[in-house]
Image: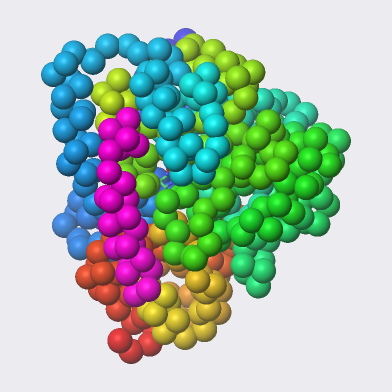
Amino acid sequence: MLKSDAAPNGAAGFPVCVSKMKLSPAVTALKPSATIAAAAKAKALKSQGVTVYDFTLGEPDFNTPEHIQNAAIEAMRAGHTHYTPSGGTLELKKAICAAYQRDYQIKYEPNQVVVSNGAKHSIHNVLTALCGPGDEVIIPAPYWVSYAALVELAGATPVIVETSEASGWRLTGPQFAAAVTPKTRMLLLNSPCNPTGATYSTDQLQALADVAAKHDLLVCSDEIYERLLYTDEPFRCFATLPGMYERTIIISGVSKAYAMTGWRIGWTLATPFITAAMDNLQSQETSNPCSVSQYAAAAALTGSQECVEAMRREFAKRRQYTLERVAALPGVNMPAPGGAFYAFFNISSYFGKPLGAKRQVVQTATDFCTALLEDAHVALVSGDAFGAPGYVRLSFATSIDTLKSGFDRIQSFLGGSV
Ligand code: PMP
Ligand code: GLU
């Protein structure tokens, strides 16, 4: 039966087949990505001609370095515009293996790599290939907005373990052990962490590795921010810890380190058994990642790494400025983020107080972000989406000038003088 007037499950004016136009249970339960939704809200306001100070999306504001762009252009001209092997070109897989050998002295072979359409897709592949109904995946909170949703999409159950600001937002071995049940399959770890910027030392990672070994668990280690560190201790790839190689699935990609978010290239490194399963899955779902982007990613990995360091140094300056401005906000404290490009701070001391020119009173971080956007035209992401009520996330992957104007506005919204 077709109905053309406003129907409950169709957009107004669109005809819907009432009996069959139902979404699947998995998609019905799915919430939109909160980071992308917050960015869309900021963009909608910008499209009305309003100047918005947008600190929502975690993506470098730099353009992709020129030598990487050139590699893509050359690839197109050379006719590399066709399907590639489903898990990526051999050339890119070799470049990824060589980069891990160079950076972490760890040996991977091309049959341990699956290249996907961004690291988000890689995480989806891992969870879909390895987890299903009845399986539990342990996720330390605060967590990146897509983790729990992707676990649920795979039919598995996210088990959220709270960490505290006082302990630097790190999961400890005893906390991890206490969350393990006979159904636990995997720990989904993210260091440096989005949204907190928390990084783990080797000893802290080892404590988690000991629990994984004791309970025979997998560890999916999302290392997408591995090159964006502001601490003295070098990055430790989880798979390099003693006994962890076989049970670790590494997630990373070019999005953050090389300012290549739009190219959509991420990867997994795992045992050949797991890799073959993910390759199989990807061959049915998407065929292969974009051919031209793969040539660009290979150039990124094999070319000079100076561009990565130049961008990291710039992020370090912005982080320093951000730390100073957050410290100057009355009633707000924040542990310094050791990596990534986010400031994550508690604004709950402002709940119940009149804020901004409109004297709005809010009780949640989500309402705080809405009021801040409407009143001061500053866009942040609510901590509610990261499993951390009372907090907000500010991406400092933007110019110091924008940060300055944004913080001035946040400060006056909170009632302080600038
Ligand atoms: N993991 C984390 C922790 C992230 O913040 C992001 C966001 N970019 C991703 C994975 C996904 O990266 P990509 O853009 O390559 O899909
Ligand atoms: N990962 C980035 C962020 O957290 C990009 C948006 C997304 O993929 O969710 O803002």
Q: Say whether residue 44 is magenta.
A: no
Of the pair 4 and 138, the residue shown nearer to us: 138
Could you tell me if residue 382 is visible in this image? no
Residue at 62%, 67% in the rendered image: 168
Is residue 239 left or right of 409 when viewed as pictured? right
| Camera sees residue 246 | yes
Q: Is residue 9 left or right of residue 357?
A: right
Magenta stretch? 298-321
Residue 159 picture quarter: top right
Q: Is residue 102 above or below residue 8?
A: below
Depth check: give the residue in front, 382 or 268.
Answer: 268
Q: Ligand 1 is located in which of the four quadrants? A: top left
Q: Please indicate whether residue 314 sits to the left or right of residue 394 in the image.
A: left
Q: Residue at x 66, y 25 (%)?
A: 130
- In the rendered view, does 70 fall on the left or right side of 237? left
Give the quarter of the figure containing the C terminus. Answer: bottom left
Residue 317 vertical placement versus 177 (above, below) = below
Residue 185, position as x, y percentages in the image = 74, 34
Give the x, y percent position of residue 69. Answer: 19, 35
- Judge whether 67 appears above or below 280 on screen: below
Q: Residue furthest right?
A: 182
**Which of the 4 image quarters holds residue 6?**
top left
Residue in the picture at 53% in, 66% down: 391
Query: Is residue 310 highlighted in magenta?
Result: yes
247, 165: nearer the viewer: 247
